[in-house]
């Protein structure tokens, strides 16, 4: 399966490039440009929410990692 990674990646990127160069692909890019320009506040709010969630996940993982640390003889 490993020998197919590079050819499939190149074919996928080539297909994506061909789509973006087509008329419908350019229409999608124009729509995305308008969407980002008019909805930038929503994107910023999502960014802040995602960052807070990532910090919460990091704190939970740190707590989990601390609880999984091997206990020494003095802590028993």
Image (tube, grey):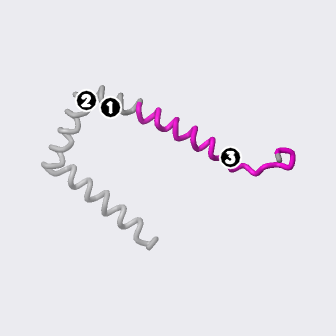
Residue bearing mark 3: 67
Reply yes or no: does residue 60 show up in magenta: yes
Q: Of label 3 and label 2, which has the lower sequence position?
A: 2
Vertical order, 21 against 1 (above or below): above
- Under tag 3, what secondary structure? helix
Q: Nearer the viewer, residue 36 or 64?
A: 64
The image's mark for residue 39 is 2
Q: In the rendered structure, which segment of residues is drawn in magenta?
A: 49-75
Q: Nearer the viewer, residue 12 or 66?
A: 66
Residue bearing mark 1: 43
Label 2 vs label 1: CA separation? 7 Å
Of badges 3 and 2, the one in the foreground is 3
Rendered residue at 22%/55% (across/down): 18
Residue 14 is left or right of residue 48, and the answer is left
Q: In which quarter of the image is the N terminus?
A: bottom left
Q: Which of 46 and 66 is in front in this view?
A: 66
Q: Which of 74 and 31 is in front in this view?
A: 74
In which image quadrant can residue 11 be found? bottom left
- Under tag 2, what secondary structure? loop
Rendered residue at 39%/32% (across/down): 47
The answer to whether mark 2 and mark 1 are in CB contact below 8 A is yes
Residue 53 is left or right of residue 22, and the answer is right
Q: Of label 1 and label 3, which has the lower sequence position?
A: 1
Vertical order, 22 against 60 (above or below): below
């Amino acid at each position: 399966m490993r020998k197919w990674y590079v050819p499939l990646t190149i074919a996928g990127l080539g297909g994506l490039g061909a789509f973006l160069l087509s008329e419908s692909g350019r229409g999608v890019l124009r729509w995305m440009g308008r969407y980002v320009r008019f909805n930038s506040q929503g994107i910023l709010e999502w960014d802040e929410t995602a960052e807070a969630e990532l910090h919460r996940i990091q704190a939970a993982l740190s707590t989990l990692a601390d609880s999984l640390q091997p206990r020494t003889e003095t802590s028993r």
